[in-house]
Image (spheres, grey):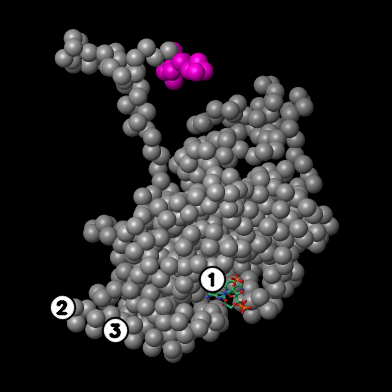
Amino acid sequence: MSKKPVMTTSAGAPIPDNQNSITAGARGPVLLQDYQLIEKLAHQNRERIPERVVHAKGWGAHGTLTITNPDISKYTKAAAFKPGAKTDMIARFSTVAGELGAADAERDVRGFALKFYTSEGNWDLVGNNTPVFFVRDPLKFPDFIHTQKRHPKSNLRSATAMWDFWSLSPESLHQVTILMSDRGCPVAPMFMNGYGSHTYSFWNAKGERHWVKFHFKTMQGHKFFTNAESEREIGRTRETYQEALFGAIEAGDFPKWKVQMQLMPEKDAEKTSYNPFDLTKVWPHKEYPPIDAGVMELNRNPDNYFAEIEQVAFSPSNIVPGISWSPDKMLQARIFSYADAHRYRLGTHYESLPVNMPKCPVHHYHKDGQMNAYGGIRTGNPDVFYEPNSFNGPVEDKTAIEPPLGISGDAARYNHRDGNDDYVQVRALFNLFDAGQKQRLFNNVADAMGPNLPKEILERQLGHFDKVHPDYAKGVRAALAAKSATKVAAE
Ligand code: NDP
């Protein structure tokens, strides 16, 4: 047998006995000087870090992005999109509302967060499995999330809060309809699409900008649970997604997504009938057909879930030369709030953690602070700790300056509901559903509303469904009536 390494304290001193604490006599009590015991208990007390306020429960893996379409490099100078480029990446999927121990197979939007370790820095795309979102203005985001989480008094999820907020925020109809449709409860991460959701921009070496939407189309096909199936599944195991994703990758059955993008010339944004920076809208495929860019494959499980999935930190602030943001208000707010969440829950230097560390040289001047574990200021020279300096410290790279983002208009709190149709794209989606899909949509809405929704809220929401399509409202009414009849019959 090979020689085993000696177990040590975290300070490296050998541990003579890991079975028996130090006591005064054979019958105790323990002595305060048993530092080994104290260290062990103290570490256990600190094993948890704050869970994410949203997207707490997650599953993820490492993989690669391979670019197969040489035309994409016409639109962006990003190295990750050069013809044939292959970039290491990590993905984390998640539910939004459930806590860290929530069951995987619950009806909810799924997070679809990607970090690409490009040769020019980390590029993060923090999307969902839906192309749109419930709100278009970040001022509404914390209120919206409060309605998805627990009621302050009952500590239960509240259908009243959810439908009250949604019915007072008709821009949510599009996402609500997707959530209540088949795609609202995928069987596992590999059976769902991912969307960058926001509008981003590409810029090329000539300084030309295109607006871009990213799409990740499952190559495993869509699979979903009905509500009855998900109830059964949750009874079987709370860990459906972890079992499926981890198991597939261990078995060498690597999930893949076709990477596509819609591209819009910069000036088109002034003439589309919808606001192309509104997160509650898609760009119709007929107007901006998706173009194939390459393939994303997940092919390596993390060695340590906590280190690589719980501590992976995605942020829309992470862009690279050739890729940038857009005026999307929600995106602008997330640029701040994601990085801020990581500084809070992981620590100031969270990007020094191995899973977050770029795989290209890093030279920054941020000094000291929490988690300054890997050298802090990364300039490669102890005398170089400020900028500008005379000691050959890292300097700016003017080639990374993006073309100016044209902005016009007076600063005000604009009401984006004015002149903004919240029904037409929902109708286009509703019309895509066949009879079976529509019936499941009606049932899922009725289940989510439950038997005790106040009448005023119910009628307000039905009014929105009616504006999408009279069949939508009628179908939900019928599903509610059928459920209440079944309940009465059972009593
Ligand atoms: P198209 O008919 O050209 O687009 C249809 C797209 O709708 C499909 O490509 C598919 O997106 C998506 N879709 C099809 N069936 C379902 C379903 N059961 N549940 C959810 N999505 C489905 O028309 P439009 O581009 O005008 O889109 C029509 C509606 O489809 C939109 O209003 C929107 O609600 C929805 N949609 C549109 C997307 C877009 O980017 N244009 C993306 C996703 C949904 P995919 O190929 O991404 O699977």
Residue 338 versus residue 278 in the image, above or below: above
Percent position of residue 464, x then y: 42, 82
Q: Residue at x 69, y 70 (%)?
A: 290
Chain-order first, disc 3 or disc 1: 1
Is the C-beta separation of discs 2 and 1 under 8 Å?
Answer: no
In the rendered structure, which amino acid carries the disc numbered 3? Ala
Q: Residue at x 74, y 29 (%)?
A: 393
Does any portion of residue 112 appear in the rendered image?
yes
- Magenta stretch: give its range: 1-13
Q: Residue at x 60, y 26 (%)?
A: 375
Near mark 2 (Cα within 10 A), the count class, few <14, some 14-19 or many ≥20, is few
Percent position of residue 416, x then y: 53, 73
* 19 displayed left or right of 115: left
Q: CA distance from mark 2 to mark 3?
A: 14 Å
Q: Residue furthest right?
A: 206
Chain-order first, disc 2 or disc 3: 3
Which residue is more in the foreground, 387 or 191? 191
Q: Which mark is residue 280?
A: 1
* 261 displayed left or right of 179: right
In the rendered structure, which amino acid carries the disc numbered 1? Thr
Of tags 3 and 1, the one toward the viewer is: 3
Of helix, strand and loop, which one carries label 3?
A: helix
